[in-house]
Image: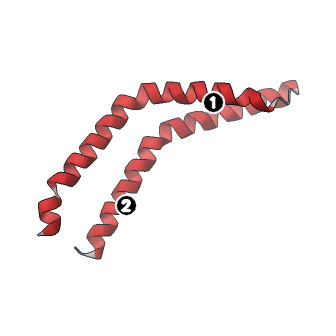
Amino acid sequence: MPVETVQSLVLEALRIALMISAPMLVTALIVGVAISLLQAVTQIQEMTLTFIPKILATFLALMITLPWMIQTLVDYFQNLFNSIPTLLG
């Protein structure tokens, strides 16, 4: 198998992994910044205050985007398995 083929497969896998993880990571980032701003404005410096909202928001983002994530992964693996004969030949 040529090096270019392996590189394209790895790049596609990394792109899919980033796409799949992006909704949860962006949600956690936005909620974290919002809670930090709230803490700065109210001068409440409780370290555990950020965990529960982040966990709940990330779980909500996961539940909303889970069907899309599963479909994206299924499509990727179907394309990958269907291209095995052309990759090996």
Query: At 60% across and 35% down in the image, what residue appears?
Result: 28
Position of residue 70 measured from the top left corner of the image (x, y, whole percent): 33, 35
The residue beneath circle 2 is: 11
Position of residue 15 measured from the top left corner of the image (x, y, whole percent): 40, 53
Mark 2 vs mark 1: which is more N-terminal? 2
Tag 2: Cα neighbours inside 10 Å, few (<14), some, or many (≥20)? few
The residue beneath circle 1 is: 54
Which amino acid type is shown beneath numbered disc 2?
Leu
Task: Please state, as top left, top right, bottom left or bottom right, where the C terminus lies in the image.
Answer: bottom left
Query: Helix, strand, or loop for circle 1?
Result: helix
Q: Quadrant of residue 32?
A: top right
Query: Helix, strand, or loop for circle 2?
Result: helix
Relative horizontal placement of residue 33, taking residue 88 as reference (left or right): right
Query: At 52% across and 27% down in the image, what residue appears?
Result: 59
**Nearer the camera: disc 2 or disc 1:** 1
Query: At 45% across and 48% down in the image, what residue appears?
Result: 18
Q: Quadrant of residue 4?
A: bottom left
Query: At 36% across and 55% down in the image, what residue appears?
Result: 13
